[in-house]
Image (cartoon, rainbow, N blue to C red):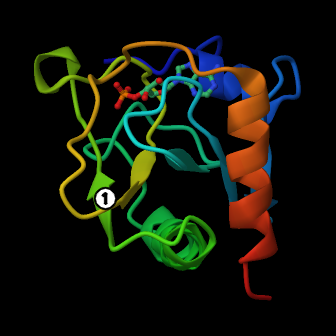
Amino acid sequence: MIYDQNNIFAKILRGEMPCEKLYEDDHTLAFMDIMPQADGHCLVIPKNPSTGLMDADPQVFASLFSTVQKIARAAQDGMQADGVTIMQFNGAAAGQTVFHLHVHILPRKDGVPLKAHSGQMEKSEIIKANAEKIRSAISS
Ligand code: AMP
């Protein structure tokens, strides 16, 4: 599959679409998912373009997963979660809907099932409140 420069996450990276940003460095961006499957659901993307894992430059993985770890820790602490699920989809058949490599971070509470993937839009005030909890737990 050819990388589409106009996918939603490419537009977010170029500042052409808004996002509720959690963290950014030279190589990665973390922001809230607008259709969360769990409270505090967020995403980490590399700035380097690839549609998914298969066509990514392996050199992006160190910085990508360094940020995944940083944000997963903050999501667990900030959301007072009991655990964190990490998900990553490749191809429409696997459930991928946005074709720029991304890693899902889902704070989990004991006994609370995940909601549907790409289901319902969350109210922006709830996303902002959860983002604030996660941001305040990010360690430098
Ligand atoms: P996937 O199905 O793995 O490609 O995941 C794409 C994710 O992006 C889904 O969880 C969507 O809810 C989420 N999403 C789609 N559009 C946006 C957006 N504009 N800002 C934040 N998250 C988004």
Name the residue rendered at 57%, 73% in the picture. 63
Q: Position of residue 111 (x, y in %)?
A: 18, 56
- Outermost residue, bottom direction? 140
In the image, residue 38 above or below residue 132: above
Q: Quadrant of the C terminus?
A: bottom right
Image: 48 above or below 50: below
Q: Which residue is mark 1?
A: 86
Q: Residues within 10 Å of mark 1 (few under 14, many from 20)?
A: some
Horizontal placement of 59 versus 46: left or right? Answer: left
- Is residue 58 toward the left or the right of residue 64 in the image? left
Cβ of mark 1 under 8 A from ligand 1: no
- The kind of residue on which mark 1 rests is Ile
Query: Residue 27's quadrant in the figure?
Result: bottom right
Q: Tell me where residue 64 appears, x and y as whole percent.
A: 52, 65
From this viewpoint, which residue is outermost toward the left? 93
Front in this rendered view, residue 82 or 31:
82
Under tag 1, what secondary structure?
strand
In the image shown, does 139 or 27 lie closer to the viewer?
Answer: 139
Instruction: Please state the horizontal and vertical placement of residue 30, each as a whole percent of the image.
Output: 66, 53
* Identity of the residue drawn at 83% across and 29% down: 14
| Residue sitting nearer the eye, 88 or 50 | 88
Q: Quadrant of the N terminus?
A: top left
**What x and y, as percent, mark residue 82?**
34, 74
| Above or below, comparing residue 5 to residue 80 in the picture | above
Q: How many marks are shown on the rendered structure?
A: 1
